[in-house]
């Protein structure tokens, strides 16, 4: 993904003070990446002094992976790229709900990542069943399709497991016992 797109995606829904600090850290990171040892020490110190929101955003590997997948799916189409990114943000908000706990935030991110991965695999598998392939494109061998079906099934299980885990955590956090009905009938 081009640097300008990465910066634009990173600015999405980030508080101005967090974004300012991220920009400072990014500049220091570029200097440190160029071999500047003083910049590396300063980067480490400033990162340690940063708010949890800054550290969380700078270390958000999950979103970076999601945007790599989005770039793959979009194949250079800005509309698709921005729409998928927006869709992930909407899913995060819908799934996390109001005032999510840190554990719910982690599990929500897992659900969203699994959803995106499953959508990509569905699209790739669907392409295998096109009746007319573009010129120069060969159909994948059946062994590859079987392998990809196994990968897709595994992704589907992980997706459902992440949803189930989130539901379980919410139930435990609500401290709601399971419903049990006991009925006694006395016959005389």
Image (tube, grey):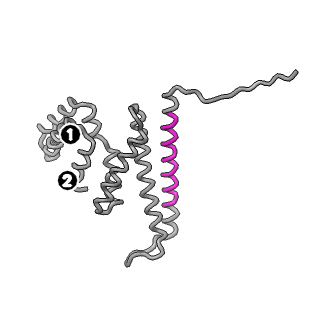
* Main SS category, magenta section: helix
Residue 86 picture location, percent across and down:
33, 50
Residue placed at 33% from the left, 59% from the top? 80
In the orientation shown, which residue stands out farthest toward the front? 188
Is 35 drawn above or below residue 141 in the view shown? above
Name the residue beneath numbered marker 2: 4
Residues 50 and 41: in front is 50
Name the residue beneath numbered marker 1: 19
In which quadrant is the C terminus drawn? Answer: top right
* Sequence order check, earlier mark of 1 and 2: 2
- Alpha-carbon neighbours of circle 1 within 10 Å: few (<14), some, or many (≥20)? some
Residue 131 picture location, percent across and down:
48, 75
User: Which of the 4 image quarters holds residue 20?
Assistant: top left
Is 37 drawn above or below residue 79 in the view shown? above
- Alpha-carbon neighbours of circle 2 within 10 Å: few (<14), some, or many (≥20)? few
Residue 115 picture location, percent across and down:
44, 50
Residue placed at 23% from the left, 45% from the top? 11
Residues 115 and 136: in front is 115
Question: Seen in the image, is 160 located left or right of residue 133?
Answer: right
Residue placed at 41% from the left, 37% from the top? 97
The magenta stretch spans residue 13 = no
Tell me which segment is drawn in magenta. Answer: 148-169
Residue placed at 52% from the left, 69% from the top? 142
The magenta stretch spans residue 167 = yes
């Amino acid at each position: 993904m081009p640097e300008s797109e990465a910066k634009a995606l990173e600015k999405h829904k980030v508080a101005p003070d967090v974004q300012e600090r991220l920009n400072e850290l990014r500049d220091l990171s570029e200097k440190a990446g160029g071999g500047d040892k003083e910049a590396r020490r300063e980067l480490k110190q400033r990162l340690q002094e940063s708010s949890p929101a800054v550290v969380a955003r700078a270390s958000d590997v999950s979103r970076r992976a999601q945007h790599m997948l989005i770039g793959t799916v979009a194949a250079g189409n800005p509309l698709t790229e921005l729409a998928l990114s927006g869709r992930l943000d909407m899913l995060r908000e819908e799934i996390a709900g109001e005032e999510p706990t840190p554990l719910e935030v982690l599990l929500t991110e897992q659900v969203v990542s699994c959803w995106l991965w499953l959508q990509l695999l569905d699209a790739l598998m669907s392409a295998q069943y096109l009746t007319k392939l573009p010129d120069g494109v060969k159909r994948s061998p059946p062994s590859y399709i079987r392998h990809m079906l196994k990968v897709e099934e595994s992704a589907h299980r992980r997706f459902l497991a992440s949803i189930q885990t989130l539901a379980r955590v919410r139930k435990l956090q609500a401290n709601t016992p399971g419903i049990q009905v006991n009925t006694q009938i006395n016959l005389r």
